[in-house]
Amino acid sequence: MQHLRSTLDRIDRKGYGAYRDLSGSHDFRSFTLVVDRVQRDPFAPPSLIRVRTKENRFDRDLFANLVRRVAFEDFLTRSVEREIRRVVHGDRGSGGSGRVEIQRASQVVLPRTSMVVEPGYVEARMAVGLPARGRSVDARAARTVLLEELPEVVRRGLIPAPEGGIVVEKARLHVETVEDADHLRGLLSDLGLVAFVAEGAVLPRESGASDRPLESGAIPFRSPEEYRAEVELPNRGVVTGMGVPEGVTLVAGGGFHGKSTLLSALSWGVYDHVPGDGRELVVAREDAVKVRAEDGRSVSGVDISAMIGVLPGGRTTEDFSTPNASGSTSQAANIAEAIEVGTSLLLVDEDTSATNFMIRDERMRELVRREPISPFIDFVRPLHRSLGVSTVVVVGGVGDYLDVADRVILLEEYSPSEATARSREITGKFPPRAPLTDRDVPPPRERTIRASSVDLRRGERQSARGRGLHAIELGRERVDLSYLEQLAEVGQTEAIARIIGEWAAAGGIRGMGELVRGALASVSEKGLDPLGSFQGHPGEMSLPRAQELAAAINRIRPLRAGPRM
Ligand code: ADP
Ligand code: MG
């Protein structure tokens, strides 16, 4: 600390580059500050620092196993973020002077690079805008930030009461909530369920732009009697809620009655949520994929022949590529790709689907004889029977889906009820729709992908970086991830970019499934840190799912991929 103080005195008012003298570790009373990377000027991205406490005084049981450790690290990241907001004044000069940051966590709990909990210490990875007046060192402001504000953030945000500010009961609630959700997700398969929504869950969100719970007027979830299931969780004990069984589940209801909100909550149920989110005990199979139409996307060598037959000009679809997919072909590709990397649950919303992919009615069958699409309505049952892939489909307009559903849940005024029997009566009143094809769906053919299709060069450098939540940049190529509805946070996008970067740099030809599983196995063994660009502070990353990693690769426009090349 003394050394840091004297270094700051020495470099005061010098050119900004003098801050480089802060590189390395500095000993504070209760922690070590490591300055890993000093920014070039006050306007550049902030300097990267780590803060490591000298001991870990938290109860061992808060991080006794992997799930608990991830949850506890998540808790501490949020706690540091909150204390930064309370303690740090911010703006102390030009550019980012005086700003202190830690990775922003979304509503979901994920392994992140921002925090490491070990039996002997707790380490937070942060960023600081080293203060400048114009372009020269402002040592007085730097002293305030590094010697006053930062230690206070550490005390309040990383150290348990009474010395520090962390209320251990809150940490325990966080960890136990996550552990329960994770346990619940693990039960689904044995119970023959694909999803579970606890009684009292709050599904609606604050707004289309915010994933926080709707504060006022939210109607808590109530399960229909017929689907009520009881589960026993390690911390909460017995919990009841709606169990969604395997097979084809139809969610019907009038416009604005909460259908999409329910489906969206299920799609986020692949992740654990923080206490207070409202969806703490809303879970789905971890491999669930929400699929939608995405016209304009590129498709590389995907076998969509089970859904789409011969295209104009006699073009077959076992190895389908296009730089510009239509609504229906993009949705078919999204489904085939989801199955390729392994999914047991598709979530489909009529609102975001291509109509001609979902259904074709009698009149159109008469008029249009050359229709390559065999609509999803004919595919959804064989998909479950042959491949064990269940579907939850939200429908407001297309009643034909009543014919193929194993069960129908009706939403009225945000309240679900069982409507299978009634829909059977209704379908009995109409002539049966065109005979149900009882065909088998073959398992998808696995593709291989060529690393050489990705060119990482960008000027002198090679680059593979995330650009916000919904884009990555590989060399000069931008990959659009706007329609990946289950990407939770920027750190996942960054990790995806870096994994793709490593694959592209390594070269070769690999199976898609093998690549994705291999990359995630390596991350779960070694953590996210090795994906960082240099020693020490690895940057801000969160764990992505295999599904989003594969989806990002699939959207690389120059990608060369196909059935075993
Ligand atoms: P649908 O898909 O049936 O047309 P949405 O799911 O889009 O309807 O919901 C319509 C509106 O109702 C949204 O603004 C949503 O936030 C709100 N909403 C959904 N569920 C609830 C609920 N349980 N309580 C209060 N508002 C809700
Ligand atoms: Mg809707």
Image: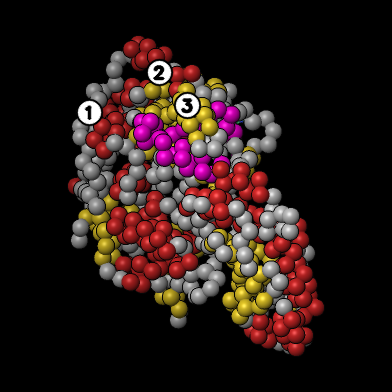
Above or below, comparing residue 512 to residue 382 in the picture:
below
Residue shown at 30%/71% (left/top)?
507
Contact check, label 1 and label 2, Cβ < 8 Å: no
Contact check, label 2 and label 3, Cβ < 8 Å: no
Residue highlighted by disc 1? 437
Above or below, comparing residue 463 to residue 513 in the picture:
below
Q: How is the image coloured?
A: secondary structure
Q: Magenta segment range?
A: 177-205
Q: Is residue 399 within the magenta segment?
A: no
Q: Nearer the viewer, residue 400 or 505?
A: 505
Left/right of residue 1 with respect to residue 244 in the rendered view: right
Q: Nearer the viewer, residue 232 or 244?
A: 232
Residue highlighted by disc 3? 230
Residue shown at 51%/52% (left/top)?
64
Mark 1–mark 2 distance (CA, rounded to whole Å): 22 Å
Mark 2 surroundings: few (<14), some (14-19) or many (≥20) residues within 10 A: some
Q: Is residue 200 within the magenta segment?
A: yes
Mark 1 surroundings: few (<14), some (14-19) or many (≥20) residues within 10 A: few
Q: Amino acid at mark 2?
A: Thr
Q: Quadrant of the C terminus?
A: bottom left
Residue shown at 49%/45% (left/top)?
271
Query: Looking at the picture, how far across and down is residue 152, in whole percent?
Result: 74, 64
Residue highlighted by disc 2? 420
Q: Nearer the viewer, mark 2 or mark 3?
A: 3
User: Which disc, if any, is residue 21?
Assistant: none
Q: Nearer the viewer, residue 122 or 124?
A: 122
Query: Looking at the picture, how far across and down is residue 98, in whole percent?
Result: 73, 70
**Total number of numbered labels?**
3
Q: Nearer the viewer, mark 1 or mark 2?
A: 2
